[in-house]
Amino acid sequence: MISQELKEKIIPNLKIILLEEYHEYMNYMFDEVYVTSDKYGEKVTLNPPYNGPALQFDMLTGSFIEITDWEYIKKVGDRL
C-alpha cells in the first residue's frame, strides 16, 4: 500500500494532469499501485481511471514523470 506521505505528494500533480471530470476517481487510482525502478530511480504507477495508459510519478518527490502502458507495468513492477 502506498504511504500517505507519498500520496499527499502525488495528489497535487495528479490534479493538474487529470481532467476535472476524472478527479472523482483519484482514490480508485491509488487502490492498485506498482513500483518500478531504472537508472533514474524508483517510479510509482497508478491504476488508470479508465482503460488506457497509466500515469507514473517519482517515488521521492511525487512529481509526474510520464504516461506508460498499464499492462506492461503490472508485469514488470512490484505491487505496493
Image (spheres, grey):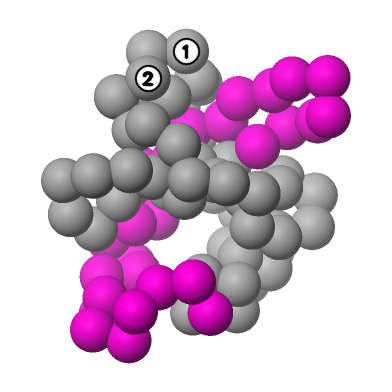
Task: Report helix, strand or loop for mark 2.
Answer: helix
Residue at the farthest bottom position: 20
Where is residue 57 drawn, in percent x and y? 62, 50
Kind of residue indicated by mark 1? Val
In this figure, which residue is indicated by the disc labeled 2? 72
Residue at the farthest left position: 51
Q: Residues within 10 Å of mark 1 (few under 14, many from 20)?
A: few
Where is residue 66 drawn, in percent x and y? 57, 46
Q: Within the image, what quadrant is residue 68 found in?
A: top left
Where is residue 42 drawn, in percent x and y? 73, 32
Left or right placement of residue 61 versus residue 51 in this view? right
Q: Residues within 10 Å of mark 2 (few under 14, many from 20)?
A: few
Q: Give the residues drawn in magenta, as a range.
A: 16-43
Residue at the farthest top position: 76
How many numbered marks appear? Answer: 2
Q: Report the Cα–Cα distance between label 1 and label 2.
A: 6 Å
**For the point 47% across and 13% down, which residue is it?**
76
**For the point 64% across and 57% down, which residue is it?**
64
- Judge by depth and name the residue closer to the eye, 36 or 6: 36
Kind of residue indicated by mark 2? Tyr
Left or right placement of residue 44 versus residue 62 in this view? left
Residue 38 colored in magenta in the image: yes
Residue 31 visible somewhere in the drawing: no
Residue 76, disc: 1
